[in-house]
Amino acid sequence: MLIGEYEHTIDAKGRLIMPAKLKDDIGEKFVITQGLDGCLFAYSQSEWKNFEEKLRTFPLTNTDARALKRFFLARATECEIDKQGRFLISSNLREFASLQKEVVIIGVLDKIEIWSKDKWLKYSEQENMEADEIAARMENLGI
């Protein structure tokens, strides 16, 4: 299970250290793609296959379904952790997520999210203020 929050720095070449506590669950090879809310999503090989299967069920005739497939698949990249525990994030994904120097990596059950530290701080402040309201709206889901 992928959980926790970890702060790291990304180097000039776009390499980032995978937190040791997440490394076992994400695996040596994994897939990174554009995520929602301005972050990146990283999936283990098995979770990526599950995600792909969900995308395959989207109807070809639905405009939103086609757009969402393109959003997640066009820039998806397979990554591999090197001997120093680092992995490379492509320049187009770094640009999408505004990754500069300080990065926050969070585990979210079935995936990892990679955020610029500034974006994460703004998002988490907003989220903390609205947590009670969000929980109330999700009551019908058993939360």
Image (cartoon, rainbow, N blue to C red):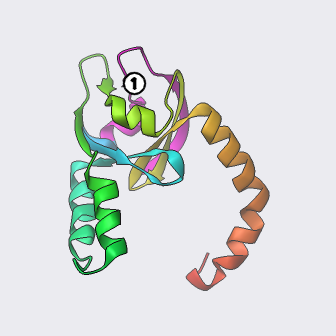
Magenta-drawn segment: 1-24
Task: Choose between 7 and 67: the one closer to the eye.
Answer: 67
**Can the viewer see residue 28?**
no
Q: In this view, does 29 lie above or below 128?
A: above
Residue drawn at (26%, 40%) of the image: 27
Rendered location of residue 111, percent (x, y): 39, 51
Q: Is residue 114 magenta?
A: no
Rendered location of residue 42, percent (x, y): 35, 45
Q: Is residue 23 magenta?
A: yes
Position of the C terminus, as image quadrant, is: bottom right
Task: Choose between 116 and 106: the one closer to the eye.
Answer: 116
Task: Choose between 135 and 90: the one closer to the eye.
Answer: 90
Residue drawn at (24%, 41%) of the image: 77
**Can the viewer see residue 55?**
yes
Q: Is residue 58 above or below residue 2?
A: below
Q: How crowded is mark 1: few (under 14 residues within 10 Å), some or many (20 or more)?
A: many
Query: Which residue is tagged 1?
Result: 16
Residue drawn at (26%, 54%) of the image: 73
Residue drawn at (37%, 73%) of the image: 64
| Amino acid of disc 1 | Leu
